[in-house]
Image (cartoon, rainbow, N blue to C red):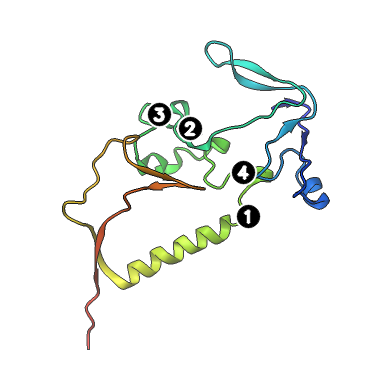
Amino acid sequence: MRGNRSFDCSSKSVTSQARHSSSNFCLPEDSPVSLNPTTLPTGGGPDGTAPVLIRKGEAVGYCVYIMHRRKDLYGPDAEEFRPERWENGALKNIGYGYLPFNGGPRVCLGQEFALLEAAYTVVRLLQMYESIEMVEGKEFDMPVGLERQLLTLVVSSADGCWVKMKKYSSSS
């Protein structure tokens, strides 16, 4: 954003300390509202390349789900699940184009704990099971976007992920 980047974070649930620690955006439950006219550098006009005027009192929202499927950042197959697109630092300069835990003043307070918990779980699974395989008849080969999704704070498969796991045999 260019121009004055101040937003109104007034809310009954926001303490004075939290309000002052967040200079540009409100806490996640609030919508950031512009206190002064400003502009977004792109997103306007017929082709999306013109600036966008944000008037005083207007809210600015964004959808992370859509941001993570931008073809200009992730390529023409942006909607495909292709983890290898991250290999060799190909997307290292993507910045705020990838926000699994949001960012800036709105970053998730539990980010480090969530990453630690996920890493611990993966290591424990690898330590306990010699194989993890898809359950026959439960393979997932539906095109992206047509699968059933469960939308809460995060998006997950509404049908789960069916696997069978084989523990390491005990050597006595």
Q: Are marks 3 and 4 in contact (CB under 8 Å)?
A: no
Label 1, secondary structure: give it: loop
Q: Amino acid at mark 1?
A: Leu
The percent position of residue 17, horizontal first and vertical second, equals 81, 52
Instruction: Name the residue located 59 percent from the left edge and 57 percent from the top edge.
Output: 110
Q: Is residue 25 above or below residue 139?
A: above
Q: Earlier in the sequence, mark 3 or mark 1?
A: 3
- Mark nearest the camera among 2 and 4 is 2
Q: Which residue is mark 3?
A: 75
Instruction: Name the residue located 74 percent from the left edge and 50 percent from the top edge.
Output: 13
Mark 3–mark 4 Cα distance, whole angstroms, equals 23 Å
Q: Which mark is residue 66?
A: 2
**Residue placed furthest toward the bottom:** 172
The percent position of residue 29, horizontal first and vertical second, equals 65, 44
Mark 1–mark 4 Cα distance, whole angstroms, equals 10 Å
Q: Amino acid at mark 2?
A: Ile
Q: Amino acid at mark 4?
A: Gly
Q: Earlier in the sequence, mark 2 or mark 3?
A: 2
Q: Amino acid at mark 3?
A: Gly
Indicate the quadrant where residue 75 lies.
Answer: top left
Q: Which residue is mark 4?
A: 103
The N terminus sits in image quarter:
top right
Instruction: Name the residue located 24 percent from the left edge and 75 percent from the top edge.
Output: 168
Label 2, secondary structure: give it: helix
Q: Earlier in the sequence, mark 1 or mark 4?
A: 4
Q: Earlier in the sequence, mark 2 or mark 1?
A: 2
Q: Are marks 2 and 4 in contact (CB under 8 Å)?
A: no
- Mark nearest the camera among 3 and 4 is 4
Q: Which residue is mark 1?
A: 109
- The crowd level at tag 4 (other Cα within 10 Å; few <14, some 14-19, many 20+) is few
